[in-house]
Amino acid sequence: MIRAILVLLFLVTPIIAQNPVALEELHSNFALKKSRVEFKRELQERINNILGGKLQSSVEKAWISVFKDISLAYWRDSTVLSALARGYESFEQRGIIFRRALMETAFTLYPDKFNNYINEIYSSTTDPMLFAYSVNIRKYQEKDYKIESAIVELEKRFPEYKSDNVLRQLAYDIETSGKKLHEVLPSPEIILGHHFEKNATIIYTFLNKNREFPGLSVIKSPDGSFVRDESGEIFHVRQMGVSVSNLPAYVRGGNTPQGIFSIVGWYVSPTDEIGPTPCVLTRIPFEKPPSTFFHKNNKYKTWHISDYSNLLPESWKDYEPMYQSYFCGKMGRGLIVMHGSVDDLSFYKDKPYYPLTPTKGCLVTKELWDEETGKATESDQAKLFNAFISTGSTNGYLVVVDIIDDERPVRIKDIKKYIKSE
């Protein structure tokens, strides 16, 4: 994912038919040791040449590009720290896109620094996204911070906040901050048994509210049965829905949104860091026309929330987190797919999700590669893709739900107990 993540997706046309992927056929030059060394050398050079130079309006775009790469590599050095400090020092002179990227990158790499700047932004900004960043960063930095106090500031600064795509979701986070997930989550049994659409394959990805712990994906065939592996167990693979910042989905570059995604096929990404294993191609609302998202089963020609709501079972229609994908799409997020990874795992060796990797919002599975040959030695993405195409339909929906908030990965038993046939 490092470098130009998903930038070429717009150029990719999903393919309709595909044979199962064989592990031994997966190869990536990007996995080779020499490629790892070259990537680090090039990134260090860009850091020195771009972040080490003068910060002015004409170079903001170049800085943002480097911000993306150093975030995904958790790259920290004196040049990076100095550049972030200079960014905050000239914060009011910078463009809004730069300011957002700066806050995300600084929090990702140095979450305990720049407190004074964060407090000032929290107290003065009129930009909803910057306010959302500041609330979540303060929640992390101030261990005794009561997030409920932010609702007062929110209502004072943004009296129409309920009509804003970012602030609506932030308000829900604030209002439910003291509750355990089981207190608000509708019955998973209902959504697991729900019939979304005729002849549709449904992928369910159940995640931990703390996204640094892995989640699990299971697949339901068009006939309503769950795909099983060779042993007869319900097929499942671990999957991550964490961004490098681990910030909420409603900020740009945040975690994978909960809610419904449309599955519209598959493709092989041209991005080196994603690798050669086929991706499941998903779209969120507003990213494509309603007819594409709803597979021509929409009532309205333009985007209307009732079409989206009608996909949900009755008991889930009032559950606000299930609308994250809708409002995140409305605010401009997109290019969120299910893919593998050829990222350098040395960047993440100290993370609880290792050897999985973070993204900028996508869902990612574990893949391991031989640095000497470039061949895959393990690929959960190939397993996921093969299980997906075994259903006979490459159209359907992806349903993403936080199902637990314990300090552990999601387990298959957390899901099986809600499946009626089990």
Image (spheres, rainbow, N blue to C red):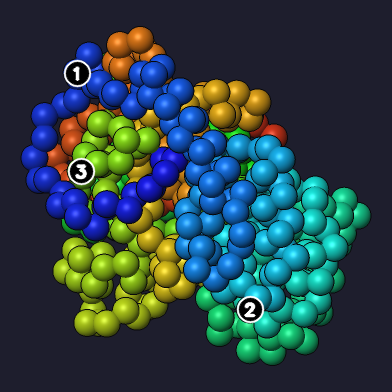
Query: Badge 2: how crowded within 10 Å, few (<14), some, or many (20+)?
Result: few
Mark nearer the N terminus (1 vs 2): 1
Q: Nearer the viewer, residue 158 or 215?
A: 158
Q: CA distance from mark 1 to mark 2?
A: 48 Å
- Residue position for label 1: 25
Position in image of residue 203 (x %, y %): 34, 44
Q: CA distance from mark 3 to mark 1?
A: 16 Å
Pointer 1 with pointer 2, Cβ within 8 A:
no
Q: Residue furthest left?
A: 17
Residue type at tag 3: Tyr
Residue type at tag 1: Glu
Q: Does residue 384 appear in the picture of this structure?
A: no
Residue 185 sits in quarter: bottom right
Q: Residue at x 67, y 44 (%)?
A: 79
Residue type at tag 2: Asp
Tell me the quarter of the image containing the C terminus. top left
